[in-house]
Structure formats: structure tokens, C-alpha cells
Amino acid sequence: MIRLRPIEEKDTERFIQLAMLGSIGVTSLPKNKVLLEEKIQNSLEIFSSGENFVQHKTYLFIAENLETGQITGTSGILALSGGVSSTHLYRIQEELRGDGQKMAILVPIHHKKGPSELCGLFLNRSHRQSGHGKLLSIGRFLFIAQFRERFTSHLAAMMRGHFEEGPHSPFWDSIGRKFYDVSLEKVLHEVSLDKTLTAKILPSFPIYIHLLPHQAQEDIQTVHDHTLPALNFLLDEGFKMTQEIDIIDAGPRIEAEVKEIRTVRNSIKTHYQIGELKEKKNALISNCRLNFRAVHAHLQEKENGIIIDSHVADALELEQDEELFYSIIN
């Protein structure tokens, strides 16, 4: 069974090994041991904090194979984006010219204090057909549903943009590289180490989209093939495409009102009992603690609660008479 839980000190080495396997473009998982250790410490601090308010720190989760102890993936929630390193983006807008013609432009913008943001989703390649991605991606919403005061009323996510083998990005070559002449791979690596670098890449004035090469235009709001499943998960949950894109790979920024996210909206707090399941339903199930535990498993709904098997109860580390959270999923 795979369980989602907060990262712990004991996971440090295995987490670093996993992050080093990360694909190009996952800038929230820098391939730098010191920065990864710093992320772990920040996560430990925010999970242990008794202060129920939004902070500029990231809640880090790992997917753990309970049989082998292997860490198969990771995901996170940045409680408040912006801050010291503002979020720099392009906004797609239309400009009305004097002759009445409308032309699409990319307007440089930055968010000094943005909403909470999903980040750091990475699943080991050997587990990508296992269904674990849904737990890593959507399981975070059960945590948000229970601790709403720790997050903003809206939730955003930057989706990794499309680029070709190499890696090569017509979008980066057409705009960003004119201001910062390094390869796509190098700039993504440097931004993962220093988020303030994006301010130096961002141009001062809008750019007419029709002046870009055709392939660069095609890349705008197009996601990487490996990112498409995660995007579809989130769109199914109620996220919507915005008109904002990443300044490096043109990946889309999506957003949702937390209370309208399907898993949050449909989550139920209830009592449980252990027993045999006669009518199985597919669900995300979690405990109700900051020491969070969640699994993707079967349950049976009944009039005054649910029935789960003993393996689920053990995975969630449930105590007798403790309540749990669950949300039925397709």
C-alpha cells in the first residue's frame, strides 16, 4: 500500500536521491543537497507550528511504499507564493489598435503576494502507471480541506510547459534567451537554485505574440507530455486555465477557489469501523491530524460513517473512536 504523509527528518537521504531523478523543468525540486535539506527543515517547521495562519513556507509530502519503505514520489503546497522572490509571469492580453484590430500581447507581470500554490509534484518513473499520481496530486486537498486557515482562499499551480528533446524550447529561444543568453537546461537549473533570477529575465515591455516564430506561439499554454496527467487531474477537480504563463517555458498557470475544488467540496468527516467491505467505493481517505496520513483505497459507506479494512486503519495510524476524512473519487 502507498501512503501519503509529511516528510520527516529520517527521509532526508532518500528524498534527495528521489529529487536527483527529477525531470528538467521541475524547478521546485532543485538538484542541490543544501537547498533540498533547507526545504525539508522548512516543511518540518511549518507542520509542527501551532500557528494557524498562512506562511511563506512549503508543506512537503512523500508517497511511501509501506511494504518496502521506498519513497516513490513527492508533492508540496506552498502556503503563500510571492514574498522575497516575487512570481514573474506573462499575462496574455488583447491590445485594441487604432484601426480597430485586436492583437494578442504578452504583458510582463509579477505577484508580490500570490495565493497558495501546488508545487513539487514528482513521481518516480517506475511508478507512473500505478495510480500513485492521483494520491500525490489530489491527496493534498484532504489536508487543505481540514486546515483551511493555513492557506489562502484560492489555490494556483504552474504547469510545466512543452519543450523538445535536447532540451530545446522555441519559446525560450525567441524571448528569454535574448535577455539572458543561456540554454533552456541551464536557465531552468539556475532558477531552481535562485528564484530571484526570473526578475532579470523578464522584459520591461509587452511583446506581440504574432512576432514570435510559429512554434514558439504553439508552445504558449501547452504542457509537457509528462505533465498532462497532472493537468487533467486538476482540471477534473475544478481548476481553470488562467491567461498567465511561465516566462521560461510558457507553461500555463491554473487556479481554483479552494471551496470549489471537488475533493475539498465533497470531503466528509466521519467515524469509522473496521470490517469486511460488501459494497466497495474508491476513495481518498485520511486521518484528521497535522501528522497527516492519507491513502487511496476502498471503503463502504453506511448511515453513520464508513467501513474500512484493517490495512487502511493501520496505514492511517488511526486510534479507537478517532474520526477520519474521506472523499469518493472516480
Image (tube, grey):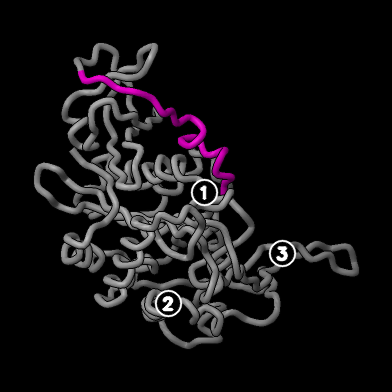
> Hey, which quadrant is residue 178 in on the image?
bottom right
Task: State the residue at coordinates (52%, 78%).
Answer: 198
Q: Amino acid at mark 2?
A: Val
Q: Which residue is mark 1?
A: 149
Image location of residue 59, percent across then percent down: 38, 57
Q: Which residue is mark 2?
A: 191
Q: Secondary structure at mark 1?
A: helix
Q: Few, some or many C-alpha atoms within 10 Å of disc 3 (few <14, some 14-19, many ≥20)?
A: some
Check the image and report above or below for 4 versus 31: above
Q: Nearer the viewer, mark 3 or mark 2?
A: 2
* Mark 1 or 2, nearer chain start: 1
| Residue 232 visible in this rendered orientation of the protein | no
Q: Nearer the viewer, residue 73 or 319?
A: 319
> Hey, which quadrant is residue 260 in on the image?
top right
Q: Is residue 271 rendered magenta in the image? A: yes
Task: State the residue at coordinates (30%, 22%).
Answer: 272
Q: Secondary structure at mark 3?
A: strand
Q: Residue furthest front?
A: 50
* Mark 3 or 2, nearer chain start: 3
Looking at the rendering, the stretch of residues picked out in magenta corresponds to: 255-274
| Residue 111 visible in this rendered orientation of the protein | yes
Q: Which residue is mark 3?
A: 104
Q: Secondary structure at mark 2?
A: helix
